[in-house]
Image (cartoon, coloured by chain):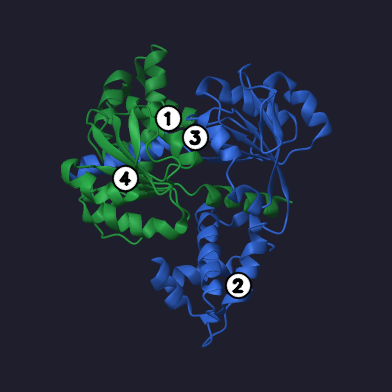
Chain colours: A green, B blue
Amino acid sequence: MDNKKNISMAVIRRLPKYQRYLGYLTEKGVERISSKELGENMGFTASQIRQDLNNFGDFGQQGYGYNVKDLYRELSSILGMDRNYKVVIIGAGNIGQALANYTRFEKLNFHLCGIFDVNPKIIGLKIRDVEIKDIDEMVGFFKDNPIDIGIIFTTSASAQKVSDILVNNQVKAILNFAPIDLNVPADIIVQNVHLSDSLLTLSCLLNQNS
Amino acid sequence: MDNKKNISMAVIRRLPKYQRYLGYLTEKGVERISSKELGENMGFTASQIRQDLNNFGDFGQQGYGYNVKDLYRELSSILGMDRNYKVVIIGAGNIGQALANYTRFEKLNFHLCGIFDVNPKIIGLKIRDVEIKDIDEMVGFFKDNPIDIGIIFTTSASAQKVSDILVNNQVKAILNFAPIDLNVPADIIVQNVHLSDSLLTLSCLLNQNS
């Protein structure tokens, strides 16, 4: 993939959907599919699907379509699913703890290596064999444990400070659930999951439809 | 708002960010701001901000910029934050329970009216005074309780069935956390929060950067 830097985020965000659907087809025993059928089943146009996939290689064959199993394997590899990632969670409130217990986590090769919080009542507790540590121990922890991804579930007030610590300790990517937009250097990858923004988007659409 | 049907989802998804940032400025006592400053602080161009906001009205003044408090109030209203929404949660596993306990929920005027699950071990338990009911009681419940928004935290296998029940019972919007894409009629509003897609997007970007 030579031109990998030029692929838009919109394309990259569609890849997990394609991969998921091809997994479903593989399970159903479907061997091949045209971009037209794939598009119709997924709500995209055939040409969008061809364009998206052409960013990553030459997977289809004129008149045959895509080999489902091969394309599933290729997409899984492009998505980095054959690699392992080391993850820490910062903020072990309700949602942080629920995600720490999220069963799909390990299936996707995300290995939870550390959980940090400020609340003395929960420091020392374990979630899936990982002890919740004091947030003040984070910097020391990173010295011995290189981490790929930090997941932030703290309050808005603490999120930027936590993000700075992650960035200063060679964490390469952040999944941010705190309802603020983080300031990070350009080479750090950030994905936001803003639950209240999703609720407000629904609210806005309902408000307009009524 | 006459042309409300034509506003793109991308614009609508940015509104909560604008509203959140203007709330922050209001708290800091900032009285007015230009589209240029707003853009610089939020990582957008001034022209994008002007275009986005022009979809909803004529808020700024040449040479003055935006009145922060007024724009905050207008955006809150466009986002439907002065309305109340009745919500049910279906699927009270770890993440469903955590969201039922989510404190920002009520602040955003989303009132949790019902929680449903299939697990007999948790049916009858209460989360914030709302009893977890058997999923088989859903249809009867909707007859007496008109609901605006259904939040789906079930397995992929059950999500479409649950979605059909919601749609057949006049629920207008769905927030879907199950990792599948739902089939719904065109007038039903769906927002997806696919945690595993967010993780895979991070994984893909890390994979490409290495």
Instruction: Return the chain for callout 1.
Output: A
Residue type beneath disc 3: Gly
Task: Tell me the quarter of the picture where residue B83 sits.
Answer: bottom right
Q: Which mark is residue A102?
A: 1
Residue A206 makes an appearance in the image: yes
Would you name the residue on which mark 2 appears?
B71
Would you name the residue on which mark 4 appears?
A150
Residue at the extreme right of the image, as rendered: B144
Instruction: Return the chain for callout 3.
Output: A
Residue B58 makes an appearance in the image: no
Residue sitting at 63 percent across and 16 percent down? B120
The secondary structure type at the circle numbered 1 is loop
Q: Nearer the viewer, residue B189 or B29?
A: B29
Discs 4, 1: same chain: yes
Residue at the extreme top of the image, as rendered: A29
**What distance separates the C-alpha of mark 4 from that of mark 2?**
34 Å
Q: Tell me where residue A152 appears, x and y as whole percent.
A: 39, 48
**What distance separates the C-alpha of mark 3 from that of mark 4?**
33 Å
Instruction: Look at the image and tell me in which quarter the N terminus of chain B lies.
Output: bottom right
Would you name the residue on which mark 3 appears?
A43
Residue type beneath disc 1: Tyr
Q: Tell me where residue B49 appears, x and y as whole percent.
A: 48, 69
The secondary structure type at the circle numbered 3 is loop
B72 lies above or below A102: below
**What distance separates the C-alpha of mark 3 from that of mark 2?**
36 Å
Instruction: Return the chain for callout 2.
Output: B
**What distance separates the C-alpha of mark 4 from that of mark 1?**
15 Å
Q: Tell me where residue B153 appears, x and y as whole percent.
A: 55, 30
